[in-house]
Amino acid sequence: MSMSSSAQLASQDIDISTGAISPIRNYSGKILTLLSGVFVAAIIIPLIWVLWDVIGEGVKQLSWQTFTETRYPAPGLTEGGFGHAIVGSLMVLATGAALSFPFGILAAVYLSEFGRGTRLAYLVKFSCNVLTGVPAILCGLFAYAVVVRGSGFSAFSGGIALGVLMLPIVIRSTEEALLLVSPDMRLASIGLGSTRFQTTMRIVLPAAAPAIVTGLILALARATGEAAPLLFTSFNNNFWSTNLFGPVATLPVMIYVFSKIPFEAQRQLAWAGALVLLALVLAASVLSRYVVHKTKK
Amino acid sequence: MQTKSPNQTSYVFKTENLNVYYGSNLAVKNVNLDIPARQITAFIGPSGCGKSTVLRCFNRTNDLIPGARVEGKLTYHGKDLYAENVDPVSVRRRIGMVFQKPNPFPKTIYDNIAYGPRVLGMKVDLDEVVETSLKRAALWDEVKDKLKESGQSLSGGQQQRLCIARALAVKPDVILMDEPCSALDPISTRRIEELMKELEEEYTIIIVTHNMQQASRVSDMTAFFSVELVGSNRVGELMEFDKTEVIFNNPVKEATKDYVEGRFG
């Protein structure tokens, strides 16, 4: 009965042509779509502009010598490179990673596996959120107060500053990665008679490993470009140095220093340094994507 | 098959006035069950009636839910499961569990089976355990050439049999199954049911199911749980527990009759 009446409706009263919708709805839909496109462009254009500038200016100066020379050019001269600054950056980053990765991962394991819902976990999470919002320069100030005042500028103190900077990122990303592991998996492992520690070590951490690695690489990428925490910790060095407890040159600090002095050679070197930094961060992001993609199969 | 006379039957689990709470909320009350050894016991009833909750008491996985609390008595081979000196880890080792959604570990098929014996430090020939477990779970022929592939690459039905094999590898004497077929197609379901009938000769099996045909097909005993509203709180209750043919053909309580005949709610 109802079927036949709906069949009649279909033949006579149903208009599905383009004119069926009121023109106001049609136009406002088109205008809003256009508007969202404009906003996307407003974000993308400056981004491309920055990339364009850095690549255009940086490539001019980039040469084999830029990497192999291990001292900055003396004022007024042009011979020199930033090989030592790359090594210095790696030293500072490695120290920061060595400090923040183990502490960060273990803290995240506590938050997601053992301390869920406890007051301590709440406190850790809260301080983590606060730490995420702290300006990078305060991390440098912290390392300055704790280490530099006692033992002078050093790559090590720069590493501490970057470690403090990375710690909340590592904790948050690792915790999120662990929470993504299905609770069923934990229950299955526990149902077989394994302890919570065994479950965490053998099931949860391996299952979350790709996502954890991504988080670690992104934390590194973030720290790679930071100049502020290094200004008064690892300081700067015109010459080659691999002394962990002495001042070293780093790429971000080099860019900062050379971008505001009146010598063309140094300014060009800062551009090249910016390009190299950009390439490093890009490589890290691509690497993290690759790791995830590879292990998901 | 029904050669077991009543006075020969031994009981694996006995519960007396078991009540389970989540926080201050009563979740299930008045559970009195004697689970016979080497038989299949089915728990049926509407959603929220506490069948899974009771099931999880038997291997103490309820412990992992914050605020879960058990009142009354629950014995396993005559031993109080909730006594002070009971180690839940060694309880779970003897009482295996299979879940609603197949949940193989993100490891190879071999390592999925070997995981239990490894964490328990069992001194066994792992190759042999893997083979016998997979054979018992009727999966060996399908996977024997790809033991190094990921357990998650198998089909849903195969994954569930892998999870059963994984549970068998630690040599339990009870297997708890929480709706093991609800995510599977009818053919895989039939394979799991056939498997349960074979396993029944060596293991005690308790299965929670929403599928009443399944309960009547595979189980020897059936427990019917119901749920009632107390204030704003849904409380589950064991209504009737008897031989499966009695529950399905000649139940004592009206509520049971309505449910098994599909006239519930």
Image (tube, coloured by chain):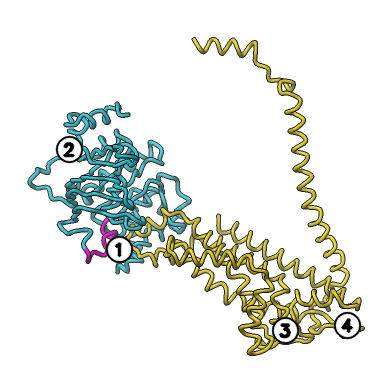
Chain colours: A yellow, B cyan
Residue named by callout 3: A248
Q: Which chain carries label 1?
A: B
Location of the C terminus of chain B by quadrant is top left
Secondary structure at numbered mark 4: loop
Which segment is the magenta one? Answer: B84-96
Residue named by callout 1: B89
Residue named by callout 4: A79
Q: Distance between the residues labelled 1 and 2?
A: 32 Å
Marks 1/2 in contact by CB < 8 Å: the verdict is no
- Above or below residue A72? Residue A111 is above
Marks 3/1 in contact by CB < 8 Å: the verdict is no
Q: How far apart are marks 2 and 4 (CA)?
A: 94 Å
Residue drawn at (17%, 38%), measured in percent from left and top?
Answer: B242
Mark 4 vs mark 3: in front: 3
Q: Where is residue A11 in the image (x, y as percent from the top left)?
A: 63, 11
Marks 2/4 in contact by CB < 8 Å: the verdict is no
Residue drawn at (88%, 69%), measured in percent from left and top?
Answer: A60
Whether residue A203 is visible here, answered yes or no, is no
Secondary structure at numbered mark 1: helix
* Furthest residue toward bottom: A151
Mark 3 vs mark 2: in front: 3
Whether residue A192 is visible here, answered yes or no, is yes
Secondary structure at numbered mark 2: strand
**Is label 3 on the same chain as label 2?**
no
- Count neighbours of disc 4 (C-alpha within 10 A) and say few if under 14, some if 14 to 19, many if 20 or more: some
Q: How far apart are marks 3 and 1 (CA)?
A: 53 Å
Q: Which amino acid does label 4 sit on?
A: Glu
Residue named by callout 2: B243
Q: Which chain carries label 3?
A: A
Q: In which quarter of the image is residue A134?
A: bottom right
Q: What residue type is labelled 3?
A: Val
